[in-house]
Image: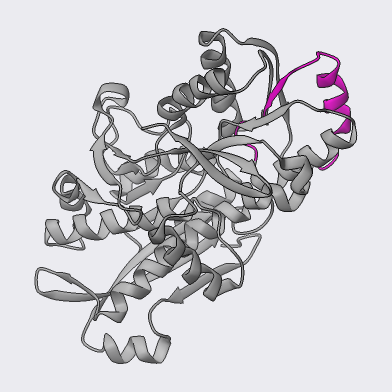
Amino acid sequence: MNLKTFAKRFTVGLGLSAGLLAGASAETLKIGVIASLTGPGAPWGLATQYGPKILAAEVNAKGGLDVGGKKYQVEVIAYDDQYKAADAVAAYNRLVRQDGVKYVILMSSASTMALKQSFEDDKVLALTAAATSKAIDANTKYMFRIITPPADYVPPLISWLKNNVKGNRVVILNPNDETGWDQAQLSNRFFKQNNYEVLGNDMYERTQKDFQPIFTKIFAMKPEVIDLGGTPPATAGLMLRQARELGYKGLFMKTGGAGPKDIVAGAGKEAAEGMVSVLYADPSNEGYKRLAAEYKKAIGQEPNEIIVIFYDAISVLLQAIQKAGDARDTTKVAAAFAQALPMKSIQGDTLTLGGKATIGGDQQIMSVTYIGAIKNGQAVVVGKTK
């Protein structure tokens, strides 16, 4: 099987030799990662990879995961899907057929939808950050959403915007794929419910770099707010810079995934000033600071704050495996999520299991989502959606 980009396989711990010594009598628990490790989505993809990696290192340093009296060293195997469904399928087949993985964590909606039925057929337990409402349904048994979906956080985000920021004329702009289509429909509905005038709902290709033509079209509509929806942070930064160069003075916001650090890096501090978005972490939280420090130690840069979601997700998974008492039986582990939750997140918030009222089953890890604004080049928490 030929993946178009690199694949990374590693054993996490205090280094390979230390890990082998610590786990000489331990078995291995493998967790697969399928995410965009390169390209514009890399800040999210690297968070998907390193959240599990950092937690696994902590577990291994303490001697491994104790499951029914048996010790397991945790190994994380990550493959790059480049935000492409076909590459995600290739990565999944390699993880499951060659690497023997029974647990997978995914970043994107496109990858999740491409593999949704495979998880059920193969009884592979999957954890997904997919935004699409189609990811989980009443028939889903082996997949859990690990992030509060837009349907839950977008209404209070837009309500906060209505009460705190002037401007009523909105244009929505999203990537032209599963993530963007779902986000566009959702945002359009909730903006209209809050009495905003939606002037347009446009799409762009993820490979696009020049946004001046689309902004020229948008600016002719005279918007006061532009929602960049599920746009990756680096791309959003590029958009802001080009839009400001064309003279746009209005508000930018994102109803989709966060990433203020990368937005500021791409746009510049002045161009990004005032942008409103969801945040998955409070940058001032001590738990987040500790996690961010470990990430920076590993790769030399600050993480996208979504890393807390992936760290917490693996915490819940490992707790469920311990509750199930059998690391090899994914059916038992899936059932044990109800015993593993509620539990505390790395930030000290309470994680609970929910979703039955909206998606037909309790397959959703419910967590706090923050509302953030960029002020003087930094993300500042200005509210919560839960």
In magenta segment, residue 225:
yes
| Image height of 330 relative to 235, above or below | below
Which quarter shows the C terminus? top left
Q: Is residue 109 visible?
A: no
20, 352: nearer the viewer: 352
Which quarter shows the N terminus? bottom right
- The percent coordinates of residue 153 (x first, y second) are 44, 29
- The percent coordinates of residue 184 (x first, y second) are 59, 23
- The percent coordinates of residue 312 (x first, y second) are 34, 54
Q: Is residue 60 visible?
A: yes
Query: Residue at the spot x=78%, y=44% of the render?
Result: 270
- The percent coordinates of residue 210 (x first, y second) are 86, 39
In magenta segment, residue 302:
no
The image quadrant of residue 151 is: top left
68, 111: nearer the viewer: 68
Query: Residue at the spot x=14%, y=62% of the render?
Result: 326
Q: Is residue 239 left or right of residue 63?
A: right
Count the marks: how many?
Answer: 0
Q: Is residue 320 left or right of residue 201?
A: left
Query: Residue at the spot x=82%, y=43% of the render?
Result: 209
Magenta segment boundaries in residue numbering: 209-231
Q: Is residue 282 left or right of residue 57?
A: right
| Image height of 37 relative to 209, above or below | below
110, 17: nearer the viewer: 17
Q: How is the image coloured?
A: one colour
231, 125: nearer the viewer: 231
